[in-house]
Amino acid sequence: HIENPQSPTVLLGNIDQVEADATAWAEQATDAQGRKLRKDAHCLLAGVISMPRSEEKQWDKFKVMAIKWLKEKYGDNLQCVIEHQDEAHPHLHFYCIAKNGQSFDDIHEGKKAQKELKKQNPQATKQEQNIAFAEAMRATQDNFSQRVGQPFGLTRLGPGRRRLTRKAWQAEQAQAKALKDVEKTAKK
């Protein structure tokens, strides 16, 4: 799907080591009952952070703030961050692996929220666990938006998700840009 593919730029860690580290963690990890993990158990947390191509002039500052956020969020579990510039939007891929003694649920916000709910309420239904999962993931996205996206005038949700008219969406985009400009002026 890419006309002129380019090699990704490694910004943190070693992409060649990620698979080996994830496999090594999975081989030593055990489940709650102390049994070896199943072959299809989660062993790698991965994500993508992107920015619209129209905002490309801010990309270098954006990616620095994004990596800082990732380091604060995942600490030593953050193994690698790579950058792609050869697609429709510049973006980062990030990879996190649990440390020996940690479970995958310890580094995945949604899984951690489900686990905490089950601990607090052993009778919690699967639906309640799914709601806890979704709320935790939404909170992570909200945090990223506040700390990284909004300083660059990016909004959290698109127009279709909230059924906005084009006019309302453009007004919201203008407001986000104005807020970014005010914050930039205030910092001077």
Image (spheres, rainbow, N blue to C red):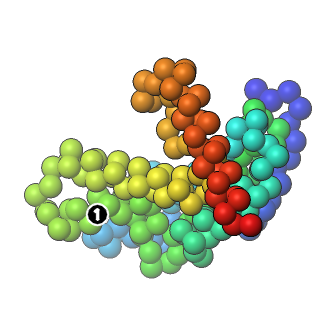
Nearer the observer, 26 or 86: 86
Q: Is residue 44 left or right of residue 37?
A: right
**Does the image show residue 155?**
yes
Quadrant where the image shows the C terminus: bottom right
Q: Residue furthest left?
A: 123
Q: Is residue 127 left or right of residue 36?
A: left
Q: Position of residue 96 (x, y in %)?
A: 58, 63
Q: Position of residue 71 (x, y in %)?
A: 62, 70
Residue at 69 percent of width and 43 percent of height: 51
Nearer the observer, 157 or 18: 157
Residue at 41 percent of width and 60 percent of height: 109
Quadrant where the image shows the N terminus: top right
Nearer the observer, 5 or 22: 5
Q: Residue furthest bottom?
A: 101
Mark 1 nearby-residue class (10 Å; few <14, some 14–19, many ≥20): some
Which residue was labeled with disc 1? Answer: 115
Numbered circles on residues, count: 1
Residue at 49 percent of width and 20 percent of height: 165
Residue at 59 percent of width and 43 percent of height: 176
Q: Position of residue 39 (x, y in %)?
A: 46, 54
Nearer the observer, 184 or 57: 184
**Does the image show residue 17?**
no
Q: Position of residue 93 (x, y in %)?
A: 67, 51
Q: Is residue 76 left or right of residue 165?
A: right
Tag 1: amino acid: Lys
Which secondary structure, mark 1? helix
